[in-house]
Amino acid sequence: MVFSNETRKQTIHQLKHTELDLLIVGGGITGAGVAIQAAASGIKTGLIEMQDFAEGTSSRSTKLVHGGIRYLKSFDVGVVADTVKERAVVQGIAPHIPRPFPMLLPIYQESGSTFDMFSVKIAMDLYDRLAGVEGSQYANYTVTKDEVLQREPQLSADNLQGGGVYLDFVNNDARLVIENIKEADELGGLMASHVKAVGMLHNDAGQVVGLHVKDLLDDTEFDIHAKLVINTTGPWADKFNALDDHEKHAPTLRPTKGVHLVVDGSRLPVPQPTYMDTGLNDGRMFFVVPREGKTYFGTTDTDYTGDYEHPRVEQEDVDYLLKVVNKRFPESHMTIDDIEASWAGLRPLINDNGSSDYNGGGANSGKVSDDSFAALIEVVNAYEDDQATRADVERAISKLETAHAEAGLSPSQVSRGSSLDQATDGLITLSGGKITDYRKMAAGALALIRRILVDRFNVDAPAVDSKKLQVSGGHFDPTNVEETMAFYIRIGVDAGLSEKEAQDLANRFGSNTSRVLTYAVDGPAPGLSLKETMSLRYSLNEEMTLTPVDYLLRRTNALLFHAETLAELKQPVVDEMAQTLGWDDSVKAQQLAALNAAIADSQLAYLKTAPAPVHPE
Ligand code: FAD
């Protein structure tokens, strides 16, 4: 498989000269999920993305595939039931990406607390039941205050009651996108980054028949013709729909900004992802997640109207998150100077969905009523007092599930918090949702697309089972992840890597690891380790890496979690890319400058730089 700058030219040629069945606008997780399923169904599929793949929200999430969090906060039984099922599906189709990592939930007794030790246990038991992990190694348990403090000695002991531990998964958002895109390409889809939709094409009957687009790498403009166009532009969905001069689309989104900050692991040592109330009595909870020797924490949630392509971390975001961290980890004395990297993303929230928190309930999320929940608590209380049996508790729980199942989803919802619509001029919009639900959202859209293709265009695309459609790198038995990884680590070591280096590559590339290792043949590039050379060359040739930032931020996450390696990596990465992509000295200088700017932004140089002292004359 080759998916590179070279193939991009051919792809653009084909996009210009083919009438597609389906043109997808937006190469985040939503568009990537639609692309893989459409291409697998034999639908003639094209996808355009105006930035790098995943450069929008889909590389800027909390990087969790969480099941219990929303429920645990709002007792949103239906959401958990759906999410944990879907999480298992995503783990099955991309087994090298989401990984189980139990979450610690410290419980504080204070005004505005989300849980006490009693309600958290009920919530976690119900969660385990929905996730089907009762009695397994991932079953929940509670820990005492001392045990919580043993795990996280910097945590504030004031009002700490204890904690709960339950199964959650960590994710690599940007890599999940690129692996879907690569597979869609392999299946015959035409995937092009840095191509922006700038206008809509309509036929005489007023139906959308394609897009006028601009190749942002050479500033040329051209038309792409398609029977159907789907808008998967996430937070940009309303902006894209505003290009439609035949139909007025009511705005549907209310994007909010969420920020995460990264510090060295030694500054905030946590052995596992941790989730707790902020302690500021503001109804919010926050995450602290260990990753690759660092710890990141977040997030904020503020309405956003600025530049969608470059949402920035502002001083007030830093102030809020430092306040929260210093409240909960007072011994850390965290300051802005500790921050090694950061990111900000825009949630594509549907206006009427009510939920601005991926971990809390939404107005149309099938929330269990207070009455139902109170009834459950009553039975559990009776059980604790030996006045009710375990069977009574189980019956009460299943009543909650039934109550939810009857509520169902509104027809326009393919997944909670998402919406699928078709305008009268034929334009389809799929927006909202979250990464965890992407496969399901895409499956809903595909059902609509296949129906329209057969009814209106006599194109009969077969249905595929998207639950079994493995992404690139995920072609192995998902029930055997550890053994498969051990195999790829072994062949990495045989190719001359250390155990740790081989492990990094296997975790990043899954079943493509053997392809990656073939790039060892010419030995290491000047200034780069053998591992980095193989990873970079593979990524340039097979993952549409076009800039150093694509590589260091989204194909790997060096820019976020390995800031200390960047000084050494920068120049050799640019040099090696220049070799492959034929850059002259001026392009090299531009690319290095863009990389330096991205690093400075991520490290918050614009906030850390102290104002020049004022010297009175
Ligand atoms: P995007 O990823 O933004 O993709 C849309 C793409 O469209 C962009 O890349 C953009 O460049 C492109 N585009 C726009 N206009 C045009 C045009 N005219 N032409 C061509 N291309 C165009 N979800 C989870 O499951 N787990 C989490 O832990 C989680 N945490 C989150 C934390 C935060 C702070 C945020 C902001 C979100 C979080 N989410 C989480 C939600 C999740 O990240 C988003 O729902 C998801 O990434 C949205 O994907 P998308 O493809 O719809 O949008």
Image (cartoon, rainbow, N blue to C red):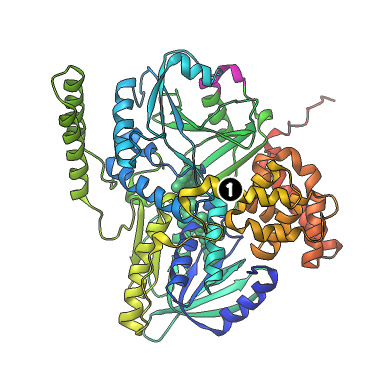
Total marks placed: 1
- Read off the magenta span: 326-333
Task: Label 1: state its secondary structure.
Answer: helix
Is residue 609 positioned above or below 534 on the image? above
The spot of residue 542 in percent (x, y) is: 65, 64
Question: Does the magenta portion include 290?
Answer: no
Depth order, front residue of 509/221: 509
The spot of residue 540 in percent (x, y) is: 70, 62
Q: Quadrant of the C terminus?
A: top right
Q: Which residue is mark 1?
A: 485
Depth order, front residue of 177/339: 177
Q: Quadrant of the N terminus?
A: bottom right
* Three-letter amino acid code of the residue under disc 1: Met
Mark 1 sits near ligand 1, with its Cβ under 8 Å away: no
Depth order, front residue of 5/586: 5
Depth order, front residue of 9/425: 9
Residue at point 68% right, 35% down? 340
User: Left of 482 or right of it: where is 333?
Assistant: right
Q: Assess disc 1: are there few (<14), some (14-19) or many (≥20) residues with their C-alpha within 10 Å of its C-alpha.
A: many
Q: Is residue 326 visible?
A: yes
Splitting the image into 4 quarters, where does residue 616 fall? top right
Residue at point 55% right, 22% down? 326
The spot of residue 436 in percent (x, y) is: 43, 50
